[in-house]
Amino acid sequence: QQQVKQSPQSLIVQKGGISIINCAYENTAFDYFPWYQQFPGKGPALLIAIRPDVSEKKEGRFTISFNKSAKQFSLHIMDSQPGDSATYFCAASKGYSSASKIIFGSGTRLSIRP
Amino acid sequence: DAGVIQSPRHEVTEMGQEVTLRCKPISGHNSLFWYRQTMMRGLELLIYFNNNVPIDDSGMPEDRFSAKMPNASFSTLKIQPSEPRDSAVYFCASKSGDTNYGYTFGSGTRLTVV
């Protein structure tokens, strides 16, 4: 059972463009939605996260948009740079404590063309 | 802080052999997670511990897999006997309930079973 569905599987964007990755979840009990960034040979690293009490969170060039009624959220990367080329995972969890487990989406391989 | 430390970084073994992967979480983190990453299945949660106690091992694929956390600074994931389909990158991650920063992942162990 895939609780967090992510699309697209891969994405190519020109330098300076906007990269958009979408995710949908099923479990309405999820209340924490992080995005992770993974470079080749490295483990995933937390990029940005949102709680469902807000519809948008922005950190630098990275923005999460959250639609609670549609059970969807997305990552927008503005002014995409070649250094943003990586695999991005959306995720969700119930609760915020150390005991909560995070369910990951299938990942999006993003390539930024110079 | 040295981050989450995993060893070995690479492991090549023959089918049927026992494999032990090791993880040292960040000091003070009280939850530890083992994930497996493959192209086909993405990031799969295998098992996680809270305060050294296994909380959820429903992701462990079969009895050939076992995990232990004898103390707060060390965990092992053992596969016995190993099979070619176990080939994957295995990640360990740790988390503290006192942080907003989600999981911290190690750099992973790339396991190849021939």
Image (tube, coloured by chain):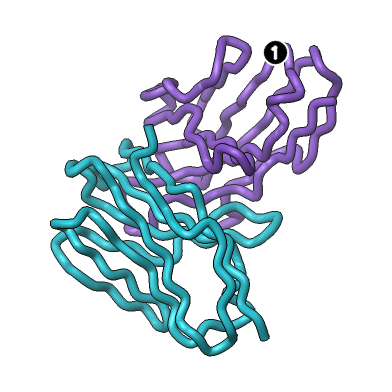
Chain colours: A cyan, B purple
Front residue of A48 and B69: A48
Local secondary structure at mark 1 = loop
The residue indicated by pointer 1 is: B80
Q: Residues within 10 Å of mark 1 (few under 14, many from 20)?
A: some
Front residue of A7 and B1: A7
Residue at the spot x=54%, y=54% of the render?
A: A44
- Count of numbered tags: 1
Give the percent coordinates (x, y) of residue B77. Answer: 61, 25
Name the image quarter holding the C terminus of chain A.
Answer: bottom right
Residue at the spot x=73%, y=40% of the render?
A: B110
Above or below residue B28? Residue A83 is below
- The answer to whether A79 appears left or right of B3 in the picture is left
Give residue B108's quadrant in the image: top right
Name the image quarter holding the N terminus of chain A.
Answer: top left
Residue at the spot x=38%, y=51% of the render?
A: A91
Give the percent coordinates (x, y) of residue B107. Answer: 65, 50
Kind of residue sitting beneath label 1: Gln
The reply to whether residue A85 is in sight is yes
Front residue of A16 and A50: A16
